[in-house]
Amino acid sequence: MRLPPHPAFDALRFADGQPGPAHRWLVRLLLALKRPGEAWEVAKAILAGKRVRARDRAAILWGARHALTPPPLPAGTVEAVPGLRIATPAEILSGGAGAAALVVLTAPGHRLVPGAPRAIVEAFAADPGLGALYGDAVVTGPGAAPLLPVLRPAFDPDYLLAADYIGPVVAIRRAVLDRLGLDPTLPGAETADLLLRLAAESPHAVRHLPRLLSTWSPSAAVAPEGWASSRRALAERHLAGSGRAAASGGILALRRDLPVPPLASLIIPTRDRVELLQACIESIRAHTDWPSLEIIVCDNDSRHPRTLAYLQRLAGEGVRVLPCPGPFNFAAMNNRAAAQARGRLLVFVNNDVVAYRGDWLRRMAEEALRPDVGAVGAKLLDVRERIQHGGIVLGTGGLVTHAHRHFPGTAPGYLASLRATHRVSAVTAACLAVEARKFQAVGGFDEAAFAVDFNDVDLCLRLEAAGYRTLMVPGAVLYHHEAASRRWNPEARSRHEAEVAALRARWGARLDADPWYHPGFDPRAGTYVRLRAWEGASPR
């Protein structure tokens, strides 16, 4: 579908540029001929009736894409509900909220669906502390045909400042509206501003209702003339003079000032595979514009002469080489290095990560040094220029998985989430930044329960429990040759299974529901690839 050329619609462009069926099958054929071994793995999974494995293998070979056809819209008319008023911000500003107990703010091109008013009223009645509520939408085209689903995550101020992922359809208690009001100097961003001010007062007063509430017809929507400038003004207001908002269409990058960048300690575990380590360190040296840096290499019993020679050379060049003998324990190695690190900022980096843009660490540090932020992750690309890591989603792929895995590296992401800094449940320790004091406050990585796998997920969830948010920063981009240095054997598989069990035992309930990922997506497929039934929509 073609969206109008206005930045207000940039969050909807996740499906732009996807090839049609004929082109898609031609590309698939060419890739299958180029990589017959991978194509045979797909065919074997299909012949064995293993549909999930077949889809996973196909995504590895052909890449992932959105296949998000929404179900038919609910039939009937929108019911009138006593005590609920539907109005635009302009109407509220000119005539007040009236006597209704609940007000649904809206805009041209947006309409509630049948059942939505009653669902809104019931949600407020069930939660006296609820001040504002938003739900999901379907983008419609000619003839009101459903084209794209807009399935939103939980409320995230950072995400809302960077991209208007919530949109104008928001239900608010009139008492809240009367008390906080709408800012007439922010045309097109009044609703976002109101939500941010309300959430600053009471973080749990703004909630997402995971059901279809409205339709969105971009062809009928007329974004206010000053929409882009209002969004930027709103972001700069929240930066309060301590940074700037850099616009790229309708998506903003909030860059925060760091008057005196602190020492950052980069911690790199390794064992032999000198070609990986050398590529990692040389790329960091060449492409890191951070003024105060120390590198600590945790050496786990390297024996190859070339590796030992390179480590000796590094030591002569000022790199700290920390011997970590014994069975490979990724968490313990990182903990040991963190305890000896001098930096205020700890940056854990796998030896198979390669930097190529100089601002990657600065982008991460700007977020990690905020008082209420814990772990910060980067966007990682694989050797095929596809997304390897876009944050970690809980409850998918059987346990956890990486967001947008195998999508093109240039993809904007669902609702611009590969362009906008946003909250996630966890990020990978392949490239993770965290303040040393926060890391130490939660006890670092759990080296007893998660020696190799899931130590990053567990760390992020413990930081969250301590009151710190985990952020994904798409502006920080590196390459990750995932598992290039790992070798599977029966012992490793047994250890992995034990760590799966430990993660389930510790975080079972949290793993079942990721607030930053919509339950309407099919957990058996790759993230943001397919839908399952979602409330408020008619069955297929």
Image: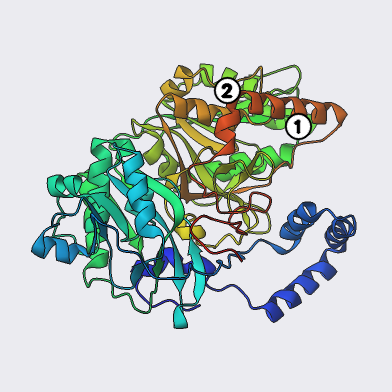
Instruction: Give the numbered dot on residue 272.
Output: 1
Q: Is residue 304 visible?
A: no
Q: Nearer the viewer, residue 165 or 276?
A: 165
Give, as a three-letter code, the residue at label 2: Phe
Colour setup of the view: rainbow
Task: Estimate the x, y position of residue 506 in percent, counting from the top left.
Answer: 60, 23
**Mark 2 or mark 1: which comes first in sequence?**
1
User: Judging from the image, what secondary structure is the residue with disc 2 in?
Assistant: loop
**Rendered image quadrant of residue 314:** top right
State the residue position of label 2: 445
**Rendered image quadrant of residue 453:** top right
Which residue is found at the position 68% from the left and 55% from the top?
Answer: 383
Give, as a three-letter code, the residue at label 1: Asp
Task: Estimate the x, y position of residue 116 in percent, counting from the top left.
Answer: 39, 59
Which residue is found at the position 48% from the left and 57% from the top?
Answer: 151
Task: Estimate the x, y position of residue 48 in percent, counting from the top left.
Answer: 89, 55
> Outermost residue, left direction?
95
Q: Residues within 10 Å of mark 1 (few under 14, many from 20)?
A: many
Give left or right: position of 523 versus 378.
right
Marks 2 and 1 sit apart, C-alpha to C-alpha, by 23 Å
**Above or below: residue 74 compared with residue 439:** below
Q: Residues within 10 Å of mark 2 (few under 14, many from 20)?
A: many
Which residue is found at the position 48% from the left and 42% from the top?
Answer: 515
Q: Nearer the viewer, residue 508 or 306?
A: 508
Circle 2/circle 1 CB separation < 8 Å:
no
Give left or right: position of 90 versus 322.
left
